[in-house]
Amino acid sequence: MPLPNILEFTGTNISQRKFQQAQEKLLNYLGGEVTTKDEFNLNVSALNMAIAPKVDKTYVDGALAGFTNGASKFYATLALANADIANIGIKDKVEIGEVANGGTWYKATAGATTLTKSPYDPLAQAKLYADSKTESFKKNSAESLFDFNDSEKNTVAKILANGDLVLANLGDEGISEHIKNLRSVAANASENQSILELRDLDGNLVFNFTDSGDLIFGGGESLKALANKEGDSVVRIPSRYELLTDEFNLLVSSYRNLSHISDLPIPIGLCGQKFKISNKTDFLNLKISQPERIKINTPYFADDHIVHPFLCNFYREFRGFKHLLILTPYQNTQDIFENPCVYGSNDLLNFELLSDMPQPIYERYPGSYNYNSDSFGIYDHTTGEFCVCWRNGSTANGFDLWMSKTIDGITWTERERLTPLSDELLLSPNILFNPLLNKWVMYSISNDVIHESFAGNKFNYRLAENLHGPWSEPIFIDTPFTSWHQETRYCGNQFITIINDQKITGQLYLGISNDGLTWEFNNIGLIEGAHLNSYKASIVPSVIESSVQFDIFWTSSNVANGDDLWQLFHAKTQPIQIEGA
């Protein structure tokens, strides 16, 4: 198999699949028969001793013409040939067998007493070929740790002591220098034309280096434009741990070409990433303390009571914010105000009600008694839309779930129903897509109205092929505490949940799962020290080098808290170790 061309790695239409094919071709090429560095150097030394200085083509052609009708003779040594020179004709080709003077010789003139080395000598040609293959390597000052030779013993690649890789077909510069040159070209050009495009396996643009020194992302966003935005916003590039899992990456890439109508950023914790918690016990044993409360103004009151927080963090800003917080106002436990609102923040301390959009997104239906509650967010990978969802109904008439979607964070769709009206409580639901199951998974706390197998409420999940259902019967999961509200998120390629016990302990509890179906819990509460009885909480992972820590938002409840009900708190956990997955 031939050595791949550099354009197979850096061409203008390289897809992930083509890049992988080029890598495989290179590895197959380098995996052939190789010689050691010492063997190669010995061969070159022998060639240098056996080869006369090079000549030009005219001289070679003239010498070849002299061999046209001559005989071919062989002598073991040059001395034997010279001793017999009287019997050698001018047109005869003489082959010498000894190593020192081996090769092709001839009698230059009728009166010559010694033979002349032929310029058209196989060893000389071999040296020319070897020189062309190895000349580039001689110029690199770094020591070679490994030489890779083809079946003809020609060095085609070297791994250098400085960590660089040199390929014969690319000249004397290492791969790092070629990449550096590409960057410098992009930075020094003046016209906004593409010099290097990288595309996914379906041909969709991932990012584009322009000759104006800019970097354009797949959604058309310019790095320069982002860097020059007002304020001190920074685009944080995910680490290798924070990349989407292969399953999610394939899903997002595939749908981008088919039905994506939005390029809003993906909220952290709503899709799987390439890491896992090294020790699940470390997560289950995390602790936080209750800090000072966060004051938030709602569309109804300043410094209002609020409930049902759902946090979204982003690598790329959402309407100029690094974080979104979905919540419902709840002034003095009056459900007329319990309607979903969306806030932005850049420090998780100060929150701004998003402008240029309906706030709240929807109020309750007019007419017979009902109320909204239990707000949460969904990332729809099939369209790229961000969705805000909530529960509506009443205990007497049943509950259903509703959703409004956006492609830009400003314009929101008419509300649409996600589940039919049911006597199930569907407390604090949230929905994730599980690519290994190829299904949407809804987590909630609910009663068993179908089989009445227990009293009260339990943590559960149900499955659907489509975001709009139909949804399966709930699968109930036992917990070592009384469950009231929950939130379940991705943490790398694992799942985590945070559940509050409203009736007995007033605590928050953690759970973790490898598949989202089978769970482990800690029966000891998360909050240490003095604290108000807790209500629904939100949890989002944040990777820092080779560790992860968690932003946790929660509110106090109206149970035994006096005037301190429905207050918002935020705490960050200590970091715990992660590893690649």
Image (tube, helix red, strand yellow):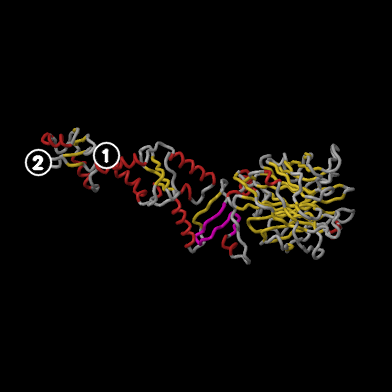
Instruction: Say which quarter of the image contains residue 44.
Output: top left
Residue 400: x and y in percent read 82, 48
Q: Amino acid type of disc 1? A: Pro
Tag on residue 330? none
* Disc nearer the start of the sequence (1/2): 2
Q: Secondary structure at mark 1?
A: helix
Where is mark 2, residue-wise?
111
Query: Which quadrant is the N terminus positioned in?
Result: top left
Tag on residue 122? 1
Residue 193: x and y in percent read 51, 59
Q: Is residue 496 magenta?
A: no
The magenta stretch is: 205-221
Which residue shows up at 86% across the image and 44% down it?
423
Residue 303: x and y in percent read 79, 64
Q: Is residue 218 magenta?
A: yes
| Camera-side residue of 556 and 271 | 556
Which residue shows up at 21% across the image and 46% down it?
59
Q: Amino acid type of disc 2? A: Gly
**Residue 276 in the figure: left or right of residue 14:** right
| Camera-side residue of 531 and 221 | 531
